Image (cartoon, rainbow, N blue to C red):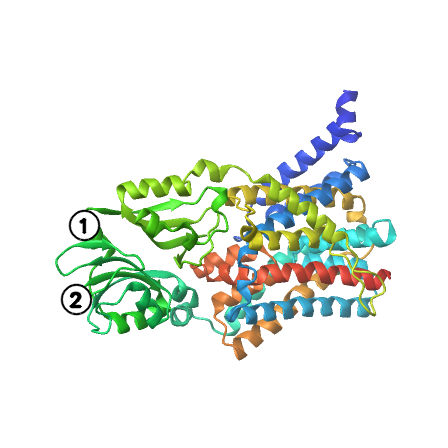
């Protein structure tokens, strides 16, 4: 049985693969266990790695370091691909306020950690680990570890130990803070729902349909393009029902007559002014139009041809060339107005109205191949990782900072992936990945990273907790978790009257904590927590990585 002992406790490729696979498998299995509806999820991989390492099942340090960093890169890059398209738009209107509140939570957490460092005498490197665990931010841990290695050439396992000790109560503390805020402000969900319905800006921007009877004599005899210029609001006229019963597909040159009935597509915020200027709304559903209209059909067609990525709807000349009208563009589950200047992306679903023959021609033009969407676009991924590593390695010198600042292997790929996913279509770069592919990449990356962190930290974990006062770190982590949340939440609710659903997502996003988001979504019964989570997540992630690096730089430098 010497071979088995060598395989489990020895060295080599087979040993490394076996240990990594076992740690991840057991950790993922335990992550499915819930206590009072709360689970630590993939973080169990970290604790299983600590247990394995404590009992002597470790990996070669160089192999461990490589797999840890590569896993971190995969994790943050896939996150950037997911949140990138909405990153810059999140700063519009209420998004600016939410991001400022989230930034306040981040900075208050850093200030609290530093104050505890001064009050307790705990090393700043250890406190950075406790901070990362308390705010459940794994990339911050990775950035801190890498920065310490870059500056000293060695490693400090107390960073990972502090993270592992503080993380469990960090997850619970975030959810407890959400519950406490509900109790503090006597939140009643029926009131929150009412306020949400009155101030739902997202719903106001999504496309909706309306049947309108033209009664304004000023519209009589005008072309559609002239009506659009005079109204000066974005909308699409899909079809027109003439007074003699004929139905026509509408293009820019179509002449409208008083007494015509038109099917209008516009956002909710613009629909009422458009109707008031054109005529009056009538009870005629989209289904009624389809029953009257035997000549034309409506289909949803998916863009799957890479050469169309980044093109504008107007560039395709669908009305003039094919006699069809694009009424809506569904992107990531949201219907957008099909304006002529709207840039298309791989995976967009176009609602097209036209004759059956024309629809077939359009289908061939746009692709409509689900098989094509399932093919991974690997070139942009690895080009992005390459550029991310280059960007992360560039030293930035700031006055008063003792050491140059690098974005590192966490920040560099994150920034590049956000930029590529947002601006790639402008340069014909296909960055589309299915949600399942993105999730697979992300989970593999975080699993490899956590397994390696646990295997590297396990040797001194028990000794730290039992003999070196590590149990105090749990309390320090809990303070770092709840104090910034409560201060900012009270301010947001009192001053800005922030909706509780939005506030839950803000808290979960500022802590980059998926378990808190899952709890918030289940409690709310709507997607508002997820929307605010996604709004603040990119900036928060960047700040978490940057502040962790700065604390290490100032302490070591």
From the viewer's perspective, tell me whether residue 371 is left or right of residue 15: left
Q: Residue at x 57, y 55 (%)?
A: 423
Judge whether residue 39 can be spotted in this image: no
Quadrant occupied by the N terminus? top right
Observer-nearest of 335 and 499: 335
| Label 1 vs 2, first from the N-terminus | 2
Name the residue at 33% across, 52% down.
Answer: 319
Where residue 354 sits: x, y (%)?
28, 48
Residue 291: image tag: 1
Q: Is residue 510 above or below residue 388?
A: below
Which label number is shown at residue 259?
A: 2
Q: CA distance from mark 1 to mark 2?
A: 20 Å
Identify which residue, 61 or 307, lies in the foreground. 307
Residue 440 spot, x, y in % from top left: 57, 41
Query: Mark on residue 121?
Result: none
Q: Residue furthest left?
A: 244
Q: Secondary structure at mark 1?
A: helix
In the picture, measured across the screen, residue 555 lies left or right of residue 476, that is right
The quarter of the picture where residue 515 lies is bottom right
Q: Nearer the viewer, mark 1 or mark 2?
A: 2
Left or right of 119? Residue 373 is left
Residue 158 vs residue 338: left or right?
A: right
Q: Are marks 1 and 2 in contact (CB under 8 Å)?
A: no
Crowding at dot 2, Cα within 10 Å, few <14 / some 14-19 / many 20+, comes out as some
Give whichever of 42, 277 is nearer the camera.
277
Around disc 1, counting alpha carbons within 10 Å, would you say few (fewer than 14), some (14 to 19), or many (20 or more)?
few
Q: Give how far across and how far down residue 181 sits, in percent.
A: 54, 70
Q: Residue at x 77, y 68 (%)?
A: 114
Residue 417 shows in this picture: yes
């Amino acid at each position: 049985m010497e071979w088995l002992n060598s395989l489990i406790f020895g060295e080599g490729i087979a040993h490394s693969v076996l240990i990594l696979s076992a740690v991840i498998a057991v950790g993922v299995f335990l992550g499915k266990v819930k206590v009072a509806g709360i689970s630590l999820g993939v973080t169990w991989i970290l604790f299983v790695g600590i247990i394995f390492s404590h009992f002597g099942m470790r990996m070669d340090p160089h192999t461990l370091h490589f797999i840890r960093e590569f896993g971190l890169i995969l994790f943050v890059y896939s996150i950037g691909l997911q949140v990138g398209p909405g990153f810059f738009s999140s700063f519009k209107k209420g998004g600016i306020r939410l991001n400022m509140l989230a930034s306040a939570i981040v900075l208050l957490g850093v200030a609290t950690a530093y104050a505890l460092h001064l009050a307790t005498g705990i090393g700043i490197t250890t406190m950075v680990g406790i901070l990362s665990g308390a705010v459940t931010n794994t990339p911050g841990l990775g950035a801190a570890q890498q920065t310490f290695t870059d500056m000293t050439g060695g490693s400090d396992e107390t960073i990972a130990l502090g993270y592992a000790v503080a993380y469990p109560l960090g997850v619970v503390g975030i959810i407890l803070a959400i519950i406490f805020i509900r109790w503090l402000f006597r939140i009643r969900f029926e009131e929150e729902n009412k306020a949400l319905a009155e101030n739902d800006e997202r719903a106001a921007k999504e496309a909706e349909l309306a049947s309108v009877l033209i009664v304004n004599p000023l519209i009589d005899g005008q072309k559609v393009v002239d009506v659009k210029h005079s109204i000066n609001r974005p909308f699409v006229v899909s079809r027109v029902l003439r007074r003699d019963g004929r139905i026509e597909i509408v293009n820019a040159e179509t002449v409208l007559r008083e007494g015509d009935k038109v099917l209008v597509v516009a956002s909710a915020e613009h629909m009422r002014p458009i109707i008031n200027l054109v005529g009056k709304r009538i009870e005629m559903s989209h289904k009624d139009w389809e029953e009257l209209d035997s000549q034309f059909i409506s289909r949803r067609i998916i863009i799957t041809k890479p050469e169309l990525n980044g093109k504008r709807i107007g560039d395709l000349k669908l009305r003039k060339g094919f006699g069809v009208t694009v009424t809506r563009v569904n992107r990531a589950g949201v219907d957008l107005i099909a304006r002529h200047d709207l840039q298309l992306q791989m995976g967009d679903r176009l609602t097209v109205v036209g004759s059956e023959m024309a629809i077939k021609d359009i289908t061939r033009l746009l692709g409509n191949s689900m098989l094509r969407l399932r093919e991974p676009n690997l070139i942009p991924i690895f080009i992005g990782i390459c550029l991310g590593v280059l960007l992360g390695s560039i030293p930035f010198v700031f006055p008063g900072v003792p050491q140059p600042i690098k974005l590192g292997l966490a920040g560099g790929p994150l920034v590049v992936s956000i930029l590529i996913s947002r601006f790639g279509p402008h340069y014909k770069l296909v960055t589309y990945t299915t949600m399942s592919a993105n999730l697979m990449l992300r989970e593999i990356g975080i699993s490899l990273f956590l397994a390696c962190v646990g295997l590297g930290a396990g040797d001194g974990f028990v000794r730290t907790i039992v003999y070196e006062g590590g149990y105090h770190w749990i309390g320090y982590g809990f303070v770092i978790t709840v104090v910034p949340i409560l201060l900012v939440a009270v301010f947001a609710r009192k001053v800005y009257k922030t909706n509780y659903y939005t506030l839950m997502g803000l808290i979960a996003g500022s802590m980059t904590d998926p378990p808190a988001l899952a709890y918030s979504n289940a409690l709310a019964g709507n997607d508002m927590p997820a929307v605010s989570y996604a709004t603040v997540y990119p900036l928060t992630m960047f700040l978490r990585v940057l502040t962790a690096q700065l604390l290490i730089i100032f302490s070591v430098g």
